Amino acid sequence: MSGAATTHEAEAGAPPAVDTRPRWRQIADLLVSNRLALFALFVLGVVLLAGILGPSLAPYGVNERVGSIVDFRLRPPSLNHIFGTDELARDVFSRVLLGARASLVVGAVAVGIALTSGTLLGLVAGFYGGKIDDFIMRAMDVLFSFPAILMAIAVVAVLGPGLVNAMIAIGIVYIPIFARVTRGSVLSVRELVYVRAARSIGASDARLIRRHILPNVAAPIIVQTTISLAFAILSEAALSFLGLGVQPPAASWGRMLAEGRGFIQQAWWMAVFPGLSIFMTVLSFNLIGDALRDVLDPHQRSAIESQGLGV
Amino acid sequence: MTGYIVRRVMQAAGVLFGVSILVFLLIHVVPGDPVRLALGTRFDPETYEALRQRAGLDQPLIVQYFNWITSAATGDLGVSFRSGRPVTQMILGRLPATLSLAFGAIVVALVMSFTLGTIAALRQGSKIDHVATAISQFGISIPDFWMGILLILLFGLQLDLLPPSGYVSPLDDPWRFLQHLVMPAVTVGVVSGSILTRFVRSSVLEALGEDYTRTARSKGLRERTILVGHILRNALIPTITVTGLQLAYLLSGVVVIEVVFSWSGLGLLAYDAVLDRDYPVLQGAVLLFAVFFLLVNLIVDLLYSYVDPRIRY
């Protein structure tokens, strides 16, 4: 306690150092100084590389057999096939590499849907208040009342399984979270002096929202986006695991896990490596989300904690 | 207080109305004819007409909604397209399995989060704190169905300690029921517990800095008394809310985990209904999950204002 007080006095005595570096630079430096975040960035870099260059990096094709089924079926990891082979003599490493794209694309598009619609709804609700606010937020409550995965399953049940429908389903599930986060932040800046000043000189609603409100509520939305990417990828994996997401012949981590489950006793590698890939990717997005929050939005409690979110 | 309760109940009723419309529409936005789809190759005109009429699909939409919601309110959720059995009966049969799994998971989550969270907060910045934080970060990021598979591999198959999957009714054999419950409950509970751990930790840290903790300490109370009577008691309040919200995760997590462990509860029922295109069953299950979630949230909110009288809405 006394230690903290002394530091405080010392700080008060010296003139506060002004950080003249550009804001993006401060953020970049802080992220780099955080070793966990650096590790996460590295993992995501690898996953992104696999997602983009997968087809040219992978030693085998998605459904290519490395040899005859009899000889190369369910081979344990070796130098030639570092993640082993599956029940159809396919190279698990190649399939994991090629599966990265599905996870990334579904995650990104789903979060894109949730981000744009949720943020827009939250902005309108928070900015206009009153009946509009009530209506939008009650509608969000309705969407939020369905357990995430169940909601996604129900949407897929209606639209039919597949990559695109999985994106839409997961996107819809995460709209209320963005709406809530945005609305809360808008409420906290709506009556601040600079907004009122802009309004009093006759700025239009659109200009007020775009120039004055949006930039000041961006931080929590950015943090939420990163964390939602983690959950969207988990949801995609879960849907594909249930056979409702990405369909064969395309490879996806969730789907591989489902196939591996059937051979768990003979070939642990079939389930372990795809699962590990999901885990590392999700963990990395979460770590970066946490680091970004520390930098951008130190007052906000973890989105996970404050909303009790889960997959 | 009464005003708040009334307002909160009204609000929940409004949301429930919206939920019922969405669930009702589920069967009507399906491209094509749901009955024809459900019958598939076993199509025969008589069964088809009977099912259509039974589901009331030949009437105007508003009439259909009205009929559906009034019978749902009296506990009649229609009949399964597949088995012809009443949906309510099918759901009730699955309820004990899901509720026991949710209950087991909550116990795992609370024990884990209070132990880890409290120790981490009391030793803030220490190695133990870092380990606890890492465990909760891992638990949040791990795909629960993957963890389930790994547990099955390790404890069910390699070590042969626990049954790898399946559900046994506690009425038939309580001991085997518990054995079957352990792995799924741990799988769901660890993910929930990881999120709660962070929350308990920050709540305890907050309580540690409060005036009442300092007062208790200066009175010379024993540390144990302060921890239990002052710190944990106050940290419990915000945790109630999050635990309530966690039920939402528990319920949705339960769907996938029930599939992994062949735990024949509501989640597995809903999943089979999707595969079979048995829409009345899916409708019933989804409605029940949503109603349960709304009820839990309502109770949590009311409990919250009761436990912490400072809160006024």
Image (cartoon, rainbow, N blue to C red):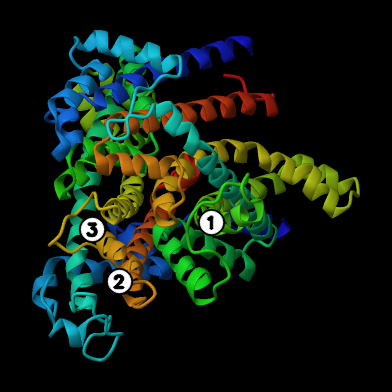
SS at circle 1: helix
Give the residue pinned by disc 3.
Answer: A103
The three-letter amino acid code for the residue at tag 3 is Ser
Q: Work out whether residue B135 or residue B18 is closer to the camera in this orientation and state it.
A: B18
Q: CA distance from mark 1 to mark 3?
A: 24 Å
Chain ID, mark 3: A
**Above or below: residue B304 compared with residue A156:** above
Q: Nearer the viewer, residue A210 or A72?
A: A72
Q: Is residue B148 above or below residue A186?
A: below
Amino acid, disc 2? Phe
Whole-angstrom CA distance, mark 2 to mark 3, is: 17 Å
Q: Are marks 1 and 2 in contact (CB under 8 Å)?
A: no
The residue nearer to you, when weighing B303 against B92, is B92
Q: Position of residue B252 (x, y in %)?
A: 42, 43
- Pointer 2: what residue? A42
Q: Are marks 2 and 3 on the same chain?
A: yes
The residue at the point 60 percent across, 23 percent down is B302
Helix, strand or loop at label 3? It is helix
Work out whether residue A209 or residue B44 is closer to the camera in this orientation and state it: B44
Q: Which residue is mark 1?
A: B190
Residue B35 as seen in the image, left or right of residue A130: left
